[in-house]
Image: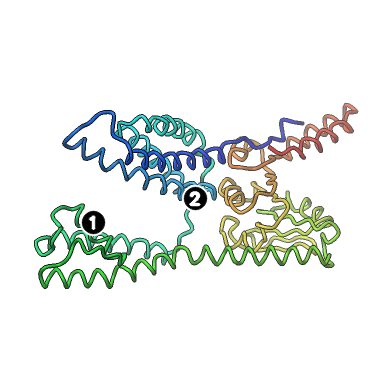
Amino acid sequence: MFEALHPRRPGGRVAVWIVAAIALTSIATGVGAILTRPALETGGTLGDLQAVAEFSGTVVGFALLVTAWGMRRGYRLAYVTAVLLVALSGAHGIVQFRAVSVPLVVLSVGGLTVLVATSGRFTRSSTLDATQIGAFLSIIGVLCYGTAGAYALRSGFDGVTTVVDAVYFTIVTASTVGYGDVHASTEAARLFAISLVVLGPATLAATVGSLFGPALDTHLAQTGRRATARLGSDAATAGHGSETGTEIVVLGSDETIAPIVDALASRASVAVVTSEERSRHSDGVDVLIGDPTADGTLERAGLDTCDAVLVGTAALRDADAVIAAARSHTDAKIVALTGGGELESTERTGADVVVDPETVLIEATVDALFGTSGGAGQSSVSAASHSG
C-alpha cells in the first residue's frame, strides 16, 4: 500500500535558497573586492577584467535575487537565467583573484550541481503579455540607441571616447541623474542628448508600470480575498463546508475524479478548475472553466486561501506544469491523483502526496480477499496523511 503513496522529495526550495545564498555571497564578495587588493596583480586585458569584476559581481548578485524570486514561482526562464548567472558569479570569483572570493567559487560550483539536479522542478512558462514584452524591449532599444548615438557623436561630447563612456552617458542621461561630467559641445550632440532625455524617462516609467503594475494589482486582490475569507469564516456563513470552514481546490476533472469531488463537497467547500466545458458535478461544487496553469484562473479559484489542492493528472495535458503553477500560489498540501507510471514525474514537480488509484484498488482488493482489509484501510489513511 505504501508504494502507491509517495511523499514529495525535497529539491525545488533547496535550489531557490542556494541561489539566494549565492546572490548574497556575490554581493558581499563584490563589496569586499572593492575594499581589498587582489592576491595577483595583473595588467592588460586580465587587469581590465579584474576591475570590471570588482563591481559587476554585486550587480550579478542582485540579479540572482530576482531569479530566486522567479524560481520560487516555478518559472523555467528564471531557472535558466539562474544557471547562467551562477556560472557567471563563479567566474567573477576566479577573476577577482582574492581570498574573499573563494567561498563564492565553492558555493557557485555546488549551486550549479543542485540546479542541474532540480531542473525538472521549474516548468512554468512566462506569463508576460505582449505589452510587457514590448515595454521591456523598448528600454533595451533606448539603451542601444543612446550608446550607439553617443559613440557615433563622441567628437561632439566632452568625456566620451569609448563604448563604456557611451553606456555611462546613456544611463546617466536617460535616468535623469545627470552628473554633468559629460556634456555636449556641438549642436548635433545637444539635439541627440535632448532626444535621449525625452525618450529615456518616458520609456523607463512605461516599463516599470507595465511590468510591476499587474503584480501589484494581483497582490492587492489577494489581500482583499484573504480578508473576505476571514470575515466569512468568522461569521460562519451558511453553505457547503461552513461547518468545518475547509476550502479545497480541484485542478482537472474527469469521470475518475468526479465521485471524489462529490464526496469532498459534502464536507468542504470545493472549487473545480477544468478546461472541459461539459464537466458536471453535484450541487455545491463551483466549476470554473479555464486554464489551470493561468494565474488569473488560479486566483479566481481562491488557490491562495484554500486549505488543500487536489490535482487530477489524468485529466490534464501537462500535469507537471499545473502542479508547479499551484505550488507557486499556495503552501497548502497538494495531493496528486495519478495514473500508472506517473508517480515519479509528479512527485518531482512538487506534490506533497501522490496517489495511484489503480494500485490502491488492486492492493485493497487483495487485502480484502486475504482478510486484511481493515489493516490496509488504516495503513492507507496513515500514509495519505503523511506530508513530505
Residue drawn at point x = 72 percent, y = 67 percent: 228
* Mark 1: amino acid: Val
Counting every numbered tag in the picture gives: 2
Residue drawn at point x = 62 percent, y = 35 percent: 9
Q: Give coordinates of residue 58: x percent, y percent.
A: 37, 45
Q: Quadrant of residue 279?
A: bottom right
Height in image: 148 above or below 347?
below
* Mark 2: amino acid: Gly
Numbered mark located on residue 167 in the image: 1
Q: Nearer the viewer, residue 114 or 283?
A: 114
Side of 383 where 179 appears, left or right = left
How many neighbours does mark 2 have within 10 angstroms: few (below 14), some (14-19), or many (20 or more)? many
- Location of mark 2 (residue): 70
Q: Which of 180 and 219 is in front in this view?
A: 180
Side of 90 where 228 appears, left or right = right
Q: Give coordinates of residue 220: x percent, y percent.
A: 59, 66
Q: Earlier in the sequence, mark 2 or mark 1?
A: 2
Mark nearest the camera among 2 and 1 is 1
Residue drawn at point x = 41 percent, y = 44 percent: 61
Q: What element carries label 2?
A: helix
Q: Is mark 1 on a helix, strand or loop?
A: helix
Label 2 – label 1 distance at C-alpha: 28 Å
Height in image: 214 above or below 118?
below
Height in image: 378 above or below 79?
above
